[in-house]
Image (cartoon, rainbow, N blue to C red):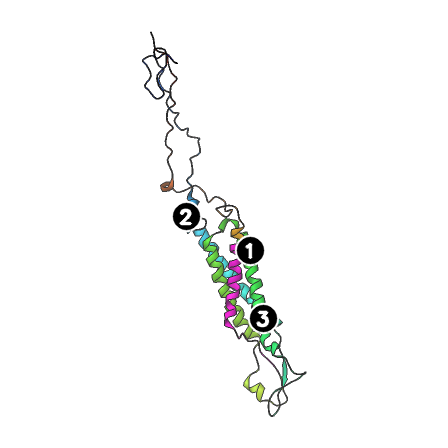
Amino acid sequence: MTDPRTAGPAPGAPAGPGAPPAPRPAPPRPDDPPRRPAIRAAWGPGLRGSRADLRAGLVTVLASTVAGLAAGALWAWLAPRVDYRVTETQPVPVVGVPSAEVFMADDGVYVLLLAGLGLVAGVLAWQVRGRRGVPVLVALATGMVGAGVVAWQLGEWLGAGPTEAELAEVGATVTTGVDLAATAALAVGPFVAVLTYLVATALTPDDDLGRPDDGPPRPAQQQFLRPPLPPVPPAVPRRR
């Protein structure tokens, strides 16, 4: 049992007259780096609407749309086509009888090309580490829609079918044109591109998607530090 006459003051009680003064907290030095607030936790990566993100989104849309030119040229080149000879009654196949799958293969080739383009676009957009986020994802989907429309129109223009004058010329040989029967195939490119980007996002362990820091925060977003509490002075024995 402790003698109350010799025991020190209780923790948190004011010290006696002979106790040393409590040390004051050291003021911050000028060379100390300021504490940066967690901006990404509040806004999320790519949601601040910076000009760099908007420029990256615009470049993504333009690059994806231009890539549709190559996809349209490949579609017109790879799509199967059949040669017919014009007779007095009707055009007849030059070689054998074409199967029904030939006339449906145009859509299949188009879907494969747009799916491959969407996969490549999603991977390349993810590789731009500093601009990862929602703006690039939206721009990727928009650009792939443009790429699908460009590939569709260019492919049908390059692989156009015979004209009325050619079909009226008996003995002439004509070739079937490239045609997209199912316009729902336009959604394949955006779907694959967005899916690729989202899978890469889900596999990333970082909350900020691995984006580097975008520089110091704005002055209004600075968080001021609360000075630390002074330490509790040691107990001083009472005088008898």
Question: Badge 3: how crowded within 10 Å, few (<14), some, or many (20+)?
Answer: some
* Tag shown at residue 124: 1
Residue at figure coordinates x 47%, y 52% from the top left: 133
Q: Do we see residue 192 in this rendering? A: yes
What amino acid is at disc 3? Gly
* Residue closest to the far front: 1
On the image, the x and y values in percent for residue 72 come to: 56, 69
Predominant secondary structure, magenta span: helix
Residue under the image location 48 percent in, 56 percent down: 137
Q: Could you say where residue 145 lies in the image, as x and y percent from the top left?
A: 49, 65
- Badge 1 crowding class, 10 Å Cα cut-off, few under 14, some 14 to 19, many 20 or more, is some
Question: Few, some or many C-alpha atoms within 10 Å of disc 2 (few <14, some 14-19, many ≥20)?
Answer: few
Q: CA distance from mark 2 to mark 1?
A: 25 Å
Task: Specify the quadrant that holds the C terminus.
Answer: top left
Q: What residue is shown at x 62% (from left), y 71% (from top)? A: 78
Residue farthest right in this picture? 95
**Residue 108: mark:** 3
Label 2: state its secondary structure.
Answer: helix
Location of residue 153 with respect to 144 vertically, above or below: below
Above or below, 164 relative to 218: below
* Residue interval drawn in magenta: 174-199
Front residue (pair 198, 54): 198
Q: What is the tally of numbered marks visible in this picture?
A: 3
